[in-house]
């Protein structure tokens, strides 16, 4: 009888200890959710070197912090196990600080805690220029939409010997990431290198027609407004496909 009482008491103690341990973990998670920033980095003047050191201690590899200074980036960060797992499984990349990047090089958005204080950061960018219309289309369209481009560029998206064919894979991974429909999925295709894209297109520019060259330009902005007292027939811009506009009031 005494043996049974002792056994029950031991089991009760172990269960209580386990529940208490889980409660401590839960409390820590709640505390981290409400205040994810590391208390060791409360100073607004914390250097990027200190940030790099903390991230290294957390098991993440750091790349290219060499040309960043305190004045360039005032950053706070708190790294926990779940965040490390997130970056490894989702981003599949190391943390990268690229001052000269013109695009966000990840498939997933960062944690809100990672961009806390973003409005107070001093950011500097190199002045760049926008893509031309055909350059933009080739950068965002899949190979199945090649007909939206001049024939001179279509081969870059489908020919096996294209220098940028790897940007238009026939098969690729889709991560629903909690969504239901396939069109909501994160499409994990390679990020396009601007230099490679423009170099490949430059080799095909000589095959463009005069009308295509005229289309591939940046022109002035046009503002159209309705004029009740104005009425005329506007000729179709694509006869045979679209009719004329018989009662046009646009100016």
Image (spheres, rainbow, N blue to C red):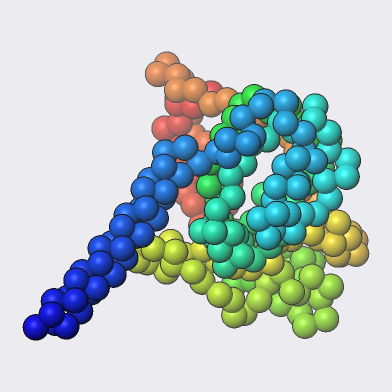
Q: Is residue 224 visible?
A: yes
> What is the x, y in percent for residue 169?
66, 76
> What is the x, y in percent for residue 6?
19, 76
Q: Quadrant of residue 95?
A: bottom right
Asked whether 9 or 42 is in front, the reply is 9
Residue most extreme to the top: 229
**Vertical side of 51 occupied by 176: above or below:** below
Asked whether 231 or 175 is in front, the reply is 175
Asked whether 213 or 172 is in front, the reply is 172
Q: Quadrant of residue 204?
A: bottom right
Residue most extreme to the front: 2
Quadrant including the N terminus: bottom left
- In the rendered structure, the answer to whether residue 142 lies left or right of residue 228 reads right
Please tell me how many numbered marks the rendered image carries. 0
Point 31% across, 57% down: residue? 20
Q: Is residue 130 visible?
A: no
Point 36% across, 48% down: residue? 27
Asked whether 213 or 162 is in front, the reply is 162
Point 40% across, 18% down: residue? 228
Point 49% across, 34% down: residue? 233
> What is the x, y in percent for residue 219?
73, 34
């Amino acid at each position: 009888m005494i043996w049974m009482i002792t056994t029950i008491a031991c089991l009760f103690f172990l269960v209580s200890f386990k529940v208490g341990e889980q409660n401590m973990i839960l409390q820590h998670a709640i505390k981290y959710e409400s205040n994810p920033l590391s208390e060791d980095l409360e100073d607004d003047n914390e250097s990027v070197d200190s940030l790099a050191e903390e991230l290294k201690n957390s098991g993440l590899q750091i790349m290219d912090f060499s040309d960043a200074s305190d004045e360039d980036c005032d950053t706070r960060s708190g790294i926990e196990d779940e965040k490390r797992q997130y970056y490894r499984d989702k981003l599949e990349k190391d943390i990268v600080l690229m001052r000269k990047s013109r695009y966000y090089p990840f498939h997933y958005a960062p944690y809100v805690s990672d961009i806390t204080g973003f409005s107070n950061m001093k950011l500097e960018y190199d002045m760049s220029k926008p893509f031309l219309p055909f350059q933009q289309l080739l950068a965002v369209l899949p190979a199945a939409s090649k007909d939206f481009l001049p024939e001179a560029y279509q081969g870059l998206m489908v020919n096996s010997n294209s220098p940028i064919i790897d940007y238009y894979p026939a098969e690729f991974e889709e991560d629903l990431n909690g969504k239901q429909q396939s069109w909501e999925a994160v499409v994990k295709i390679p990020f396009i290198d601007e230099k490679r894209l423009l170099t490949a297109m430059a080799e095909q520019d000589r095959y463009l027609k005069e009308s295509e060259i005229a289309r591939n330009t940046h022109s002035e902005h046009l503002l159209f407004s309705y004029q009740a007292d104005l009425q005329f027939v506007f000729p179709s811009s694509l006869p045979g496909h679209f009719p004329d506009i018989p009662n046009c009031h646009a100016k």
